[in-house]
Each structure stands twice: as C-alpha cells, then as structure tokens.
Image (cartoon, grey):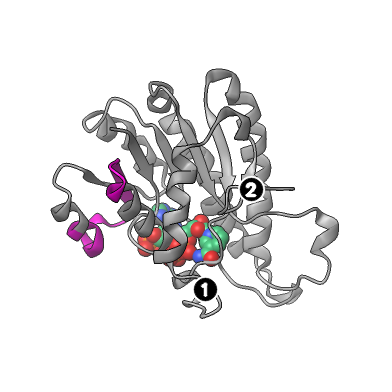
C-alpha cells in the first residue's frame, strides 16, 4: 500500500484529494493546521480505520516542520507521494493594492513552504521505490503573456516563484530517483474562489488527478501538467 502525504488537507482540493486517495486504496497522511477542528477529516478517519492519519502542520512554522519527521517516523517507513497543496490567495485589484505584507505572506505559503516541506520529508521520500512530489499550482505562461493582467498580483507572483523552484529542483533531484511535477488541478469550486459557478466542483475535478499522480513516469519529471495529463508549455 502506497503512502501519500498531503498539506492543507482539511478543506477544498486537499480534502477531496484525501477522499480520493483513500477510495483508491492509499494510506493517507492528511496534514492541516488544526486537526482538532477538521471535522470532515475525522469523519473520513472513522470510515477508513487505519488508512488515514491526521497530522498537525502549519507549513510556514519552522517548529511545526521540525516536529514533522519524528511524528512521521511513528506512522510510516516511507512516503511514496508528497502533495504540496496548501495555498492562499490574498486578492488585489490594481497596482495600488499590492501590499508588502501580502506579498511576503503569499511567498511564504505558496512558494517557500512547499520547498521546505519537501526538504523536510526528503529522507522519507527517498526510502520509497518510486517517490513522486506533486506541487499544486497555476500554470504560468511566458511573462510577455501577462500583459493587461491587473488582479491577484500576490498570488500570481508567488506561483511564478514556486514553478521556477519546482523546475530547478525537479531537474536536480531526478538523479536521485525522484519524479517531481507542478500540477494544475483545474478551476475548482473552493473557498479560494468563493465556489465560483464557472468552476468545476471538487467532486468532479479531483478524481481525475489521482490516476495521473499514481501513474507519473520519469519522462514527466519537471513538467507542469494539466488535469488531462497533458504538459503545459511554461
Ligand atoms: N481552486 C482552484 O481553482 C485552484 C486552481 C489552481 C490552483 N489551486 C491551488 O490549489 C491549492 C488548494 O486550494 P483550494 O482551492 O482547495 O483552496 P482552499 O479551499 O482555500 O484551501 C486552502 C488550504 O490551504 C491551507 N493552508 C493555508 N495556509 C496554510 C498554512 N500556513 N499551513 C497549512 N495549511 C495552510 C488551508 O488551511 P486552513 O483551513 O487552516 O486555512 C486550506 O486547507 C492551493 O495551493 C491553490 O493555490 C486552486
């Protein structure tokens, strides 16, 4: 049985991924900031005795990260799949709304934390026979195509940074047997977009992602994948 570790698993896409991986027979380690308040995860835990473990993790807190490895070593010998899912969108609507505090926070959660979680869990990932690291993100186009974009600066800039870091680390760590991708989950109804009616529901969007992650190959290392498995030209 493969083990999946997911950040921000208490709601939205992270919760739907937890549900789908469990239904597909994986052992899931679902991390979130406040497990005591994660009602939906507790319901899944009761329904999948032994299959789901709840772990406390605030991805931007060094102390929380430091506690992670000893906690994990009590649960599993290795991690087959890491899903860096936790993220925030602090909106902006024009240049004058860009704030240093919001940029810093967005980079902390969306760009830096995925790398720190990944570094922390690397020893356990390396013990798996086919370790995969999946970084949930937005597909970033050539900067020349960003013209006329005047919203969500904090989020977009932080995703360009994450994607650059993922690509560089993917190429470096491939030599050690890791398969690393950036993954766009599609436009999915969650708190992040106010359950926009134009987006797909998590119940229909997320099930497509699990077989894609399960079947990742070394040839896909360093790519940004779309929900249908095709590669985005970033
Ligand atoms: N929805 C979309 O259409 C879409 C499209 C492209 C990419 N994404 C990406 O998909 C991921 C999930 O987003 P979502 O749509 O499911 O949004 P969401 O419903 O707002 O969920 C965000 C999750 O991230 C967690 N989180 C935030 N800061 C954290 C921290 N410091 N430590 C640990 N967990 C933290 C939240 O936990 P709390 O409950 O504790 O706040 C929550 O579980 C994000 O990375 C997002 O950028 C979403």
Q: Position of residue 152 (x, y in %)?
A: 65, 69
The numbered disc on residue 155 is none
Depicted 216 relative to depicted 144: above or below: above
Q: Which residue is mark 2?
A: 230
Instruction: Kindly report which numbered mark, 2 or 1, lies closer to the viewer in this rendering.
Output: 2
The numbered disc on residue 193 is 1
Give the total number of marks visible in the rendering. 2
User: How far apart are the alpha carbons under marks 2 and 1?
Assistant: 24 Å
Q: Is ligand 1 within 8 Å of the beta carbon of the residue shown at mark 1?
A: yes
* The image quarter in which residue 127 lies: top left
**Residue 100 can be seen, yes or no:** no
Q: Residue at x 84, y 66 (%)?
A: 147
Q: Position of residue 154 (x, y in %)?
A: 64, 63
Q: Is residue 36 magenta?
A: yes
Q: Position of residue 103 (x, y in %)?
A: 63, 60
Q: Is residue 179 magenta?
A: no
Q: Is ligand 1 within 8 Å of the beta carbon of the residue shown at mark 2?
A: no
Q: Position of residue 35 (x, y in %)?
A: 25, 55
Q: Residues within 10 Å of mark 1 (few under 14, many from 20)?
A: few
Q: Residue furthest bottom?
A: 197
Q: Secondary structure at mark 2?
A: loop
Q: Residue at x 18, y 52 (%)?
A: 45
In the shown orientation, is residue 114 left or right of residue 58?
A: right
Q: Nearer the viewer, residue 31 or 202?
A: 202
Q: Secondary structure at mark 1?
A: helix
Q: Which residues are magenta?
A: 22-43
| For marks 2 and 1 on the same chain, the one whose residue lies earlier in the sequence | 1
Q: Residues within 10 Å of mark 2 (few under 14, many from 20)?
A: few
Depicted 19 relative to depicted 50: above or below: below
């Amino acid at each position: 049985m493969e083990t999946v570790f997911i950040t921000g698993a208490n709601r939205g896409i992270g919760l739907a991924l937890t549900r789908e991986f469990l239904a597909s027979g994986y052992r899931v380690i679902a991390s979130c900031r406040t497990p005591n308040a994660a009602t939906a995860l507790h319901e899944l835990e009761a329904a999948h005795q032994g299959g789901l473990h709840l772990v406390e993790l605030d991805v931007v807190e060094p102390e929380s990260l430091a506690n992670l490895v000893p906690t994990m070593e009590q649960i599993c010998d290795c991690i087959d799949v890491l899903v860096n899912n936790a993220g925030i969108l602090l909106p902006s609507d024009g240049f004058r709304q860009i704030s240093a505090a919001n940029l810093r926070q967005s980079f902390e959660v969306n760009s830096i934390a995925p790398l720190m979680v990944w570094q922390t869990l690397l020893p356990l990932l390396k013990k798996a026979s086919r370790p995969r690291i999946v970084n949930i993100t937005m597909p970033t186009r050539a900067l020349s195509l960003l013209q006329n974009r005047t919203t969500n600066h904090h989020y977009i800039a932080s995703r360009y940074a994450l994607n650059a870091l993922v690509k560089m680390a993917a190429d470096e760590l491939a030599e050690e047997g890791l398969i690393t991708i950036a993954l766009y989950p599609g436009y999915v109804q969650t708190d992040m977009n106010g359950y926009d009616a134009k987006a797909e529901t998590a119940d229909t969007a997320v099930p497509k992602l699990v077989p894609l992650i399960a079947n990742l190959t070394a040839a896909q290392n360093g790519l940004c994948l779309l929900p249908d498995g095709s590669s985005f030209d970033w």
